[in-house]
Image (spheres, rainbow, N blue to C red):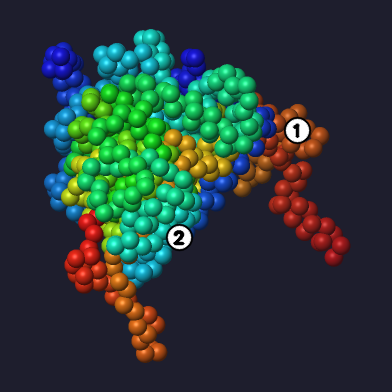
């Protein structure tokens, strides 16, 4: 049941992938519907909080503070979690994290593990590593189950299967669960998932989860969910392995009072999601007998080291920026070639790839600012996008010095704009030069060389036959002639 | 066995740990001006914490939210809890109910079968019709009830496997805001804690909210009026209604129920 994970290292550049998505009308319909519904719900429940801006500001400050003292807080978390009977492991990168989890699952003697939806495990392609070790990972979140059975990819960080319609889901369930009959209604499909997974929850003895928050002060982990599959995984199996990015740490229990207001309202447009679980290490007769937390870096310290990119780590993975983004709403998530799609993906993915891959993502935005406006922890995503674009340009033109094409182009433009006669001459030249490219409707669909970036995703209107100045001058002359 | 495993994993762990912490120290914003505790105190928290509704309205708000989640709400006074429980169970046609150790005996009506959860395994819990618990507190703003592993509330699995949850909640346990609740929970923060807001649900299929996936699909709440509201009409130019809450326990100590 292995599927090819979204991998920024091998994914095609965004403009190319987006073209494919844009032709899939069903997908665009599904994405538009889902993002509209969440946005409307979000607006309603955010609107009823008169202190929303104060909550956002507190959220931002808490995250900023947590990063400034991240080393202390992680050590404190480790101390408290271990004192309560948990084991803490540290993973420098994805490979190390996979090795630790596979080793722990193997030691637990499980051939099967149940999983709670976790973008961190998607990020490191954990399921494939488990499978290679002969361990079958069963996704238990409804959307993740749809993705897994359909051998598909998540396209949204909160609602990973939002690109699938009920009919498509029904087809997948009929085929993969070996069912003879299955209704069309969402409730029928959810019931099928409940029955299918109930057996697994009652028998599988190892669970793997992500974490929404780690609390340094108490050594507790907090998981926010809707369906109860999380609670099943957290309480029934003997062994629980939680894997969390080092950025997930919060200073104190009290900080949850901010996050638990910001996250559900932003993520699903609910005042509170159906279930939050908070636990601390091991509890006698309640929950697993073995509990492990894997703290993973995987380039997060590289993001931390960049003063302008650092705020990316404030993210609490609510997905609000995805729902608000005009680009995401057209293309859906897969075009981003990463589990982190949309505006957050555009800034997080290239940084997690140490700017070695996914360089096209910082350009997958119109910089309209809608993402910044909805972000519950006030990440200035447009600012980070521009910062990363600069990094990409610097990187691509490294060694060219003053001869790099973009620098030369900017110089030439500056020269032209400074002189009126040069500007007029340039306009005339432009009209002549564009002639072979203009189609009958007066649009340009293709530009050569570097300029092609512009026309890859949009058409360009041909220059007018006459500029305003030319028209004005001609009119003046005509008037004078008549006078 | 466990000890051995830990030692085997040690060298690699220490190295990774040391390296990550070192990288963080090199990468994080330079020289924070004060220690963590002092800096944490300075975080600006200008959002609402204290309640701004009178107690009666807070209860109404909670009820609205619970009904919004399709939960049923029953009312009773402390002396009538058993009767209210019987009514709810009858209406739902539930017979075999799991309870946690420490559930007050006087809550339990005759004619139903209550099973005390003595580490029942998941299969056994799955066979039961429902679960009856008390609660630690509730949050009106969000319609949330909080459970912790204490007498009368019990293990997390027992409120998860049965398809029906009947929860006894006292009016004095109802707070308005999330921050109020978190500050109250702080002292017992390390207990296994579950927040639930309505029955389990999903919106994963075309964003249609479907009630009930893996957790209980049906939830009823018995709201016990253990505070009396004294209201009077004031003169025209002052706020039209004022209310004072008094714990019933302080008025009629013998009638007070443990909760
Ligand atoms: S960047 Fe902000 S809006 Fe986007 S997922 Fe993260 S927290 Fe949510």
Q: Position of residue B15 (x, y in %)?
A: 17, 19
A444 and B135: which one is in front?
B135
In the image, is residue B231 above or below residue A51? Answer: below
Mark 2, residue position: B64
The residue drawn where x is 29% and y is 68% is: B227
The residue drawn where x is 68% and y is 37% is: A460
The residue drawn where x is 76% and y is 28% is: A436
Tell me if B49 is positioned left or right of A372 in this view: left
Label 2 SS: helix
In the image, is residue A453 above or below residue B189? Answer: above
Q: Position of residue B140 (x, y in %)?
A: 37, 59
Q: Position of residue A61 (x, y in %)?
A: 29, 50
The residue drawn where x is 78% and y is 53% is: A474
Q: Residue furthest front?
A: B111
Q: Which mark is residue A289?
A: none
Q: Position of residue B256 (x, y in %)?
A: 22, 63
Alpha carbons under labels 2 and 1: distance apart: 62 Å
Mark 1 sits near ligand 1, with its Cβ under 8 Å away:
no
Q: Point out the image quarter for the C terminus of chain B.
A: bottom left
Mark 1, residue position: A438
Q: Is residue A345 visible?
A: no
Label 1 SS: loop
Q: Residue furthest right?
A: A482
Tell me if A27 is positioned left or right of B175 in this view: right
In the image, is residue A43 above or below residue A288? Answer: below
Tell me if A103 is positioned left or right of B211 in this view: left
Of badges 2 and 1, the one in the foreground is 2
In the image, is residue B116 above or below residue A405? Answer: below
Mark 1 — on which chain does it sit?
A
């Amino acid at each position: 049941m292995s599927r090819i994970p979204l991998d920024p290292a091998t994914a095609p550049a965004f403009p190319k992938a987006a073209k494919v998505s844009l032709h899939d009308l069903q997908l665009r319909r599904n994405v538009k519907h889902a993002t509209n519904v969440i946005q409307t719900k979000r607006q309603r429940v955010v609107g009823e909080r008169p202190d929303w801006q104060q909550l956002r500001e507190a959220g931002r400050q808490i995250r900023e503070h947590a990063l400034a003292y991240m080393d202390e807080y992680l050590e404190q978390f480790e101390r408290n979690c271990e004192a309560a009977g948990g084991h803490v492991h540290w993973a420098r990168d994805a490979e190390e994290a996979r090795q630790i989890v596979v080793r722990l699952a193997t030691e637990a003697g499980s051939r099967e593990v149940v999983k709670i939806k976790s973008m961190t495990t998607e990020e490191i392609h954990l399921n494939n590593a488990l499978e290679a070790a002969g361990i079958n990972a069963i996704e238990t979140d409804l959307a993740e189950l749809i993705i897994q059975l359909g051998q598909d990819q998540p396209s949204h960080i909160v609602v990973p299967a939002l690109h699938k319609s009920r009919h498509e889901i029904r087809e997948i369930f009929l085929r993969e669960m070996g069912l003879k009959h299955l209704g069309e209604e969402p409730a029928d499909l959810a019931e099928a998932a409940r029955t299918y997974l109930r057996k697994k929850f009652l028998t599988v003895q190892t669970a793997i989860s992500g974490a929404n928050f780690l609390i340094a002060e108490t050594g507790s982990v907090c998981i926010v969910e809707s369906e109860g599959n999380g609670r099943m995984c957290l309480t029934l199996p003997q062994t629980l392995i939680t894997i969390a990015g080092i950025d997930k740490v919060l200073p104190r229990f009290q900080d949850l009072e901010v996050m638990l207001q910001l996250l559900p309202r932003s993520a699903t447009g609910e005042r509170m999601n159906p279930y939050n679980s908070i636990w601390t290490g091991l509890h006698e007769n309640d929950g697993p007998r073995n509990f492990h937390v894997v703290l993973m870096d995987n380039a997060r310290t590289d993001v931390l080291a960049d003063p302008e990119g650092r705020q990316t780590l404030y993210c609490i993975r609510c997905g609000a920026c995805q729902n608000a983004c005009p680009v995401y709403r057209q293309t859906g998530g897969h075009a981003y070639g990463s589990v982190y799609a949309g505006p957050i993906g555009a800034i997080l993915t290239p940084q997690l790839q140490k700017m070695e891959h996914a360089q096209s993502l910082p350009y997958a935005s119109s910089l309209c600012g809608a993402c910044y406006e909805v972000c519950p922890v006030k990440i200035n995503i447009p600012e980070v996008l521009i910062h990363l674009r600069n990094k990409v340009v610097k990187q691509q033109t490294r060694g060219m010095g003053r001869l790099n094409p973009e620098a030369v182009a900017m110089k030439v433009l500056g020269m032209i704009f400074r002189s009126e006669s040069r500007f007029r001459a340039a306009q005339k030249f432009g009209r002549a030069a564009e002639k072979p490219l203009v189609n009958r409707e007066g649009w340009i669909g293709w530009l050569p060389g570097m300029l092609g970036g512009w026309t890859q995703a949009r058409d360009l209107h041909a220059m007018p036959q006459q500029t305003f100045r030319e028209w004005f001058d001609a009119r003046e002359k005509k008037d004078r002639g008549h006078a | 066995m466990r000890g051995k495993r830990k030692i085997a994993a040690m060298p690699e762990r220490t190295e990774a740990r040391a390296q990550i912490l070192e990288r963080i120290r090199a990468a994080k914003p330079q020289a924070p001006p004060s220690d963590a505790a002092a800096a944490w105190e300075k975080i600006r928290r200008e959002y609402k914490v204290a309640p701004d509704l009178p107690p009666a309205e807070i209860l109404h708000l909670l009820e609205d939210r619970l009904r919004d989640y399709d939960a049923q709400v029953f009312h009773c006074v402390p002396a009538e809890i058993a009767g209210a429980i019987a009514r709810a169970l009858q209406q739902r046609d539930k017979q075999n109910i799991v309870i946690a150790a420490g559930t007050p005996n006087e809550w339990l009506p005759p004619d139903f079968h209550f099973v005390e959860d003595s580490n029942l395994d998941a299969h056994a819990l799955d066979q039961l019709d429902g679960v009856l618990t008390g609660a630690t507190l509730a949050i009106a703003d969000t319609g949330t009830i909080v459970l912790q592993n204490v007498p009368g509330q019990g293990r997390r699995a027992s409120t998860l496997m049965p398809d029906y949850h009947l929860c006894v909640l006292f009016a004095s346990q109802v707070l308005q805001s999330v921050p109020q609740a978190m500050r109250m929970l702080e002292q017992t923060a390390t207990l296994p804690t579950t927040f639930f807001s309505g029955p389990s649900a999903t919106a994963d299929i075309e964003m249609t909210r479907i009630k009930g996936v893996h957790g209980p699909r049906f939830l009823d709440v018995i709201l016990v009026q253990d505070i009396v509201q004294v209201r009077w009409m004031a003169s025209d130019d002052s706020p039209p209604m004022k209310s004072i809450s008094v714990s019933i326990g302080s008025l009629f100590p013998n009638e007070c129920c443990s909760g």
